[in-house]
Amino acid sequence: MAKHRGTVKWFNESKGFGFIACDDGTEAFVHYSAIEGQGGFRTLKQGDRVELEVTQSPKGPRAQKVRVLRNDDWL
């Protein structure tokens, strides 16, 4: 599966889901269970840059293996 990069459009912590705007123009649904590399409570913030894999679900693109990028990963 190809890796994509994008920006978190919004994420609702209480409901545990949100959307990521991928750099290629697609939008992907993200569930808290797809967020990697965080111990305990998994969340994203609006504007976070992320790397992810995108799969197709019956409802549309879905983010998998989401990883928040550090500033030095953006290049």
Image (cartoon, rainbow, N blue to C red):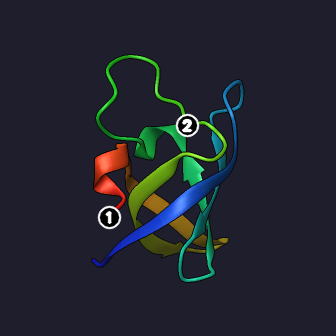
Secondary element under disc 1, as helix, strand or loop, is: loop
| Residue at numbered disc 1 | 75
Indicate the quadrant where residue 7 lies.
bottom right
Identify the disc placed on residue 7.
Answer: none
Give the quarter of the image for residue 5.
Answer: bottom left
User: Which residue: 35% across, 43% down?
Assistant: 70
Q: Is residue 69 visible?
A: no
Q: Which residue is mark 2?
A: 44
Using the rendered image of the protein, determine whether residue 45 is visible from the camera's viewpoint: yes
**Relative to the observer, which residue lies in front, 56 or 5?**
5
Task: Give the residue drawn at x 55%, y 37%.
Answer: 44
Relative image position of residue 65 (x, y in whole percent): 34, 53
Please tell me how many numbered marks the rendered image carries. 2
Q: Amino acid at mark 2?
A: Leu
Q: Residue at x 48, y 60 (%)?
A: 63
Location of residue 5 with respect to 72 vertically, above or below: below
For the residue carrying disc 1, how many other residues have a C-alpha within 10 Å: few (<14), some (14-19), or many (20+)? few
Q: Position of residue 67 (x, y in %)?
A: 36, 47
Amino acid marked by disc 1 = Leu
Q: Looking at the image, which residue is at 46% across and 28% down?
A: 42
